[in-house]
Amino acid sequence: MKYFSLNNKAPKVSFEEAVVLGLAPDKGLYFPESITPLPHSFFQNIENLSHEEIAYEAIKQFVGDEIPETELKQIITETLCFDFPCVPVEENVFSLELFHGPTMAFKDVGARFMSRCLGYFNRHDDKKKVTVLVATSGDTGGAVASGFLGVKGVEVVILYPSGKVSEIQERQLTTLGQNIKALEVDGVFDDCQDMVKKAFLDESLKPYHLTSANSINIARWLPQMFYIFFAYQQLKKHNKPIILSCPSGNFGNICAGIMAKRLGLPIAHFVASTNANDTVPRFLQQGLYEPKPSVATISNAMDVGNPSNFIRIQELYHHDLKEFENDFTSYSFTDSETKAALKDLYHRTGYIAEPHGTIGYLGLKKEMPKHPGSIGVFLETAHPIKFLDVVEPLLDLTLTIPSQIESVLGKEKVSVKIKTYQELKDFLK
Ligand SMILES: *Cc1c(COP(=O)(O)O)cnc(C)c1O
């Protein structure tokens, strides 16, 4: 499979090159040259397939012959080492829980898949080491640290804003050691992000083979299709049209959902639910794509003013606004709406959500009346414990700390403090 840059000014590359580069040299996102739907029989028979079998069928055309079948299947098995239950929360509404992995956020899936692909490409020591450089506002750092720990030939450098991530999140990215290094930046998330962007453009850092591990990287984005297939596998028996709502920040999950539909997965309608960072809902209302600087909310993993995957979504809808609007709705919700819904959901049903999943739930509830006879699923993208400072006071309860989190709390934090871009450069060299 070849990948082209959505800026159309860079050469086509292989799967391996696209994964190693992250972003194309013309700063465009990579996109597969062709998408071939899976046979009808695959969907008819999906209940009888294992997660590994489903994931292999979904991803194989995108990897092509660059990773042999046995190794690709092994990568998939190691990626999917936890459950993806679709839990009923009220009549016709389900929560697809994506937080049962090692760092308790959906980003574990993409991070584990991508790290193992890079590990495969580095299996011979003659290849140059790759350095994964990533800025995090919280969840990405932990998932990348855990997913890449001990992967041969890959160094990981995580930049996070000092004092701006939760204690659990900080422990998850500063306590692992080995090939994982944490840089504590005196600044905010945008400062971390700016330094990372600058480093990717810096010619003097070329020898260090920097790559990214956020959803611009196809090896992090494409495996996010897997769990949309798993949701369908669990909901198919209801024999009703399915509405999928994704709490959206960089729009990687929803974009993976649309990709799954291109492979034939029967999703009737998509809802992109956002917090106050409403660039896409505004676009759908006003027809104008006008990114704004991000604003801080209680669903901080979605505080994105200019979602990177939106361009891929437009490509998937052939830049046709009619086709797009037929299939796709986007709503924005405030923090107070989110808090009220989180509380209401708990008091009515006993289900404990966290702010991101709650926004997914709100978008779903707003859209469902337009599709009578359908069932709806929202992504619960993280475990409530990761946002305990919001959830506990709101619901007036104490959450039990899961073992995955307990194990990092006792470990010692190791980080290097930096303030300037030059300090990052010195560190990399
Ligand atoms: C990253 C993240 C999101 C946003 O997902 P996108 O695919 O970037 O839209 C939502 N919720 C949580 C908990 C996250 O960590």
Image (cartoon, helix red, strand yellow):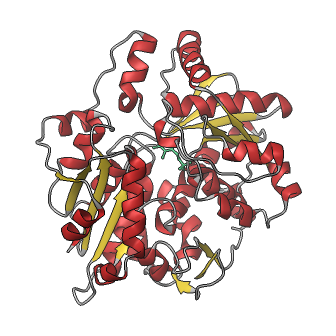
Q: Residue at x 52, y 76 (%)?
A: 63
Residue 20 lies in what quarter of the image? bottom left
Q: Is residue 414 left or right of residue 397?
A: left
Q: Nearer the viewer, residue 411 or 346?
A: 411
Q: Quadrant of the C terminus?
A: bottom left
321 to 104, vertically: above or below: below
Q: Residue at x 33, y 38 (%)?
A: 164
Q: Residue furthest left?
A: 412
Please provide percent x and percent y for residue 191: 38, 52
Number of marks drawn: 0
Please provide percent x and percent y for residue 274: 62, 38
Q: Residue furthest right?
A: 322
Q: Is residue 297 left or right of residue 111?
A: right
- Residue 137 visible to an observer of this rendering: yes
Q: Is residue 288 left or right of residue 67?
A: right
Q: Nearer the viewer, residue 317 or 45?
A: 317
Q: Is residue 164 left or right of residue 2?
A: left
Q: Quadrant of the N terminus?
A: bottom right
Residue 38 lies in what quarter of the image? bottom right
Please provide percent x and percent y for residue 64: 54, 81
- Residue 269 visible to an observer of this rendering: no
Q: Residue at x 28, y 26 (%)?
A: 401
